[in-house]
Amino acid sequence: MAGYTSIALGALLLLSCAAWGSATVYTVGGSSGWNTGINYTDWTSGKTFTVGDSLLFNYATGAHTVTEVNSGDYDSCSSSNAISSETNGPTTIQLKTTGTRYYICSISGHCGLGMKVAVTVGSSGSPSTPPPPSTSTPSPPSSTTNGNHSSAPGLAPASAVASLAGLVVLLF
Ligand SMILES: *[C@@H]1O[C@H](CO)[C@@H](O)[C@H](O)[C@H]1NC(C)=O
Ligand SMILES: *[C@@H]1O[C@H](CO)[C@@H](O)[C@H](O)[C@H]1NC(C)=O
């Protein structure tokens, strides 16, 4: 019985892991990380950010900052009215609410060198991209040239199931 219980618990654990799998961690800039000389507008294009996702800014402490600013300061590369600022790399930012977030590097000149990223966060309840239409190619019918199908192959799996069931009954 103990074995059966742990199997059931394991299945439950797997299920809850699958449920958590919807939250995505986006590494800002991909393998380039948080750095000068990168076009982060290009990086965000085509990505969908939703509440529950997070941004991972990869940089060395002291080299850069992750400073959240308003849209006007984002445009002008000003960090004087910063909403928040992280200086210890790497930095993970949780996207907890919908709306557009603006992040720049507050180190002099870096924002002008491209270190600015705007992320629009959508509701997690919004429908995700629909699955691609299933282009189901009909599987070719099994060989019909030989109409001599004995019933023996069909019986084999059935009897296997029957003996398995017997085994389970024996175990309990
Ligand atoms: C980033 O690339 C886009 C087009 O992909 C362009 O419109 C934009 O000006 C670029 N930004 C910078 C800072 O070069
Ligand atoms: C069908 O099976 C029988 C006996 O197993 C065999 O003699 C016969 O040749 C088979 N026919 C075909 C079409 O395979």
Image (spheres, helix red, strand yellow):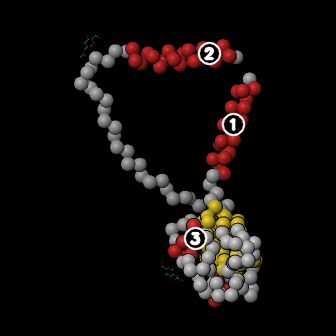
Seen at 51% across and 68% down, the residue is 46
**Which mark is drawn over residue 167?**
2
Of badges 3 and 2, the one in the foreground is 3
* CA separation in Å, label 3 and label 2: 57 Å
Q: Which residue is mark 3?
A: 32
Residue type for callout 3: Ser
Seen at 59% across and 61% down, the residue is 126
Mark 2, secondary structure of its residue = helix
Q: Which residue is mark 1?
A: 10
Asked if marks 1 and 2 touch (Cβ < 8 Å), the reply is: no
Which label's residue is closer to the chain start, 1 or 2? 1
* CA separation in Å, label 1 and label 2: 22 Å
Seen at 60% across and 80% down, the residue is 36
**Which mark is drawn over residue 140?**
none
Q: Is residue 68 among the parts visible in the rendering?
A: no
Q: Quadrant of residue 138?
A: top left
Seen at 75% across and 72% down, the residue is 88
